[in-house]
């Protein structure tokens, strides 16, 4: 694996030589979860961040997508940039209508700022309940924002540690918006499909307000590349909820401590996750179109 040789506090640098995938993606394929980081001398990182990534700006992301055969994308604001969504908005503006975004905002964000973000291609707000990313999102603040973002047609993206779902589920069920769960709920693949956290996730997904991203195979895997132990979880979610599943690379894979994935190899997991043309079309094209590209 060839990686960016610059070091970054908080994780490994990304692989700079992704393989050419053996898998040909359908026209309109969407990477529904990726990030832009800096470059820091243009778009500074947040002073209170818990990690500093290797720079991976919009040109790097666009080049990766061309290489993989990805035509559209949803860029997700990461905590290292805090509530300053400028780097993401810059990338969306340069994407020719093929890129949308998920922002991070404070509970007291102004209406004018919400309108500005909406005009810049933002489709929702992300909240973290993950220990290594610092303090949890303020649940009361999340609830106060719901009525303000609903008229914009936005949704919530929720990122949590698997052991938090039992506590979070009752709160999430009170929210009258579409909600997207990141990284398959960060379950531990070594615990099997019958583990309590995955059963809770499947139960939550019975509610049609919830969607799930079957990305982050490298995060839930315990065996390492090619991350085949994560496939049964992703495949189960796609089989059970074919109209509410999304896929993404998670490039440039922040906070990975071991086994930095090769993005071409992640694409080659897709035929195992969505083994029919119909499932692949739904996961990569139809579902993201419905949630992000209908305007």
Image (cartoon, rainbow, N blue to C red):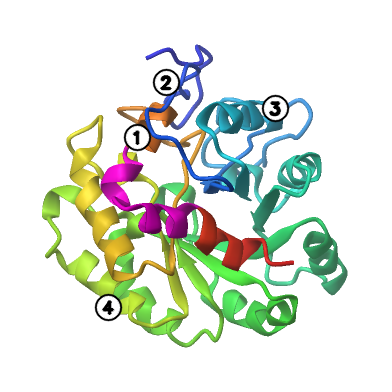
Q: Is residue 175 left or right of residue 275?
A: right
Pick whichever of labels 2 and 3 is earlier in the sequence.
2
Q: Give how far across and how far down residue 26 sits, in percent.
A: 50, 45
- The reply to whether discs 2 and 1 touch (Cβ–Cβ < 8 Å) is yes
Q: Is residue 282 visible?
A: yes
How far apart marks 4 and 2 lie (CA) works out to: 37 Å
Q: CA distance from mark 2 to mark 1?
A: 10 Å
Q: Which dot, 1 or 4, sits closer to the camera?
A: 1
> Which of the image's four quarters has the C terminus?
bottom right
- Distance in Å between CA atoms under marks 2 and 3: 18 Å
* Residue indicated by mark 4: 203
Above or below, 217 against 256 in this view is below
Q: Is residue 275 magenta?
A: yes
Residue at horizontal 25%, vertical 31%?
A: 226
274 or 126, nearer to the observer: 274
Q: Quadrant of the N terminus?
A: top left
Range shown magenta: 269-284
- Which one is earlier in the sequence, the residue at label 1 or at label 4? 4
If you read the primary sequence from the N terminus, does the residue marked by circle 1 or circle 3 appear first? 3
- Outermost residue toward the right in this view: 112
Q: Dot 3 surroundings within 10 Å: few (below 14), some, or many (20 or more)? A: few
Task: For label 1, count other residues whose C-alpha is less than 10 Å away and answer few (under 14), some (14-19) or many (20+).
Answer: some
User: Disc 1 marks which residue?
Assistant: 268
Do residues under tags 1 and 3 come within 8 Å of each other at their CB atoms? no
- Is-magenta flag for residue 203? no
Tell me the mark number nearer the camera, choosing from 4 and 2: 2
Residue 212 left/right relative to 113: left
Give the labeled residue for mark 3: 59
Q: CA distance from mark 1 to mark 4?
A: 29 Å
Residue closest to the eye, 255 or 215: 215
Q: Nearer the viewer, residue 260 or 285?
A: 285
Secondary element at tag 2: loop
């Amino acid at each position: 694996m060839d990686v960016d040789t610059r070091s970054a506090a908080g994780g490994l640098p990304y692989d700079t030589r992704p393989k050419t995938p053996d898998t040909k993606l359908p026209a309109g394929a969407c990477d529904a979860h990726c990030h832009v980081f800096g470059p820091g001398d243009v778009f500074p990182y947040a002073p209170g961040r818990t990690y500093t990534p290797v720079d991976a700006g919009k040109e790097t992301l666009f080049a990766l997508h061309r290489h993989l055969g990805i035509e559209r994308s949803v860029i997700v604001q990461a905590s290292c940039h805090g509530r300053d969504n400028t780097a993401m908005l810059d990338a969306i503006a340069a994407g020719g209508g093929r890129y949308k975004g998920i922002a991070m905002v404070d509970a007291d964000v102004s209406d004018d700022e919400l309108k500005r973000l909406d005009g810049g291609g933002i489709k929702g707000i992300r909240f973290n309940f993950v220990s290594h990313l610092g303090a949890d999102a303020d649940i009361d603040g999340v609830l106060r924002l719901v009525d303000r973002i609903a008229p914009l047609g936005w949704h919530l993206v929720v990122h949590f540690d698997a052991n938090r779902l039992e506590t979070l589920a009752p709160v999430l069920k009170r929210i009258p918006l579409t909600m997207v769960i990141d990284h398959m709920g960060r379950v531990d693949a070594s615990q099997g499909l019958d583990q309590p956290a995955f059963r809770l996730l499947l139960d939550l997904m019975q509610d049609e307000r919830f969607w799930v991203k079957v990305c982050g195979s490298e995060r839930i895997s315990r065996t390492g590349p090619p991350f085949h132990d994560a496939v049964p979880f992703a495949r189960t979610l796609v089989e059970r909820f074919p109209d509410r599943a999304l896929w993404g690379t998670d490039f440039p894979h922040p906070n990975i401590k071991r086994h930095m994935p090769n993005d071409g190899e992640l694409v080659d997991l897709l035929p195992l996750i969505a083994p029919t043309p119909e499932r692949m079309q739904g996961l990569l094209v139809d579902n993201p179109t419905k949630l992000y590209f209908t305007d």
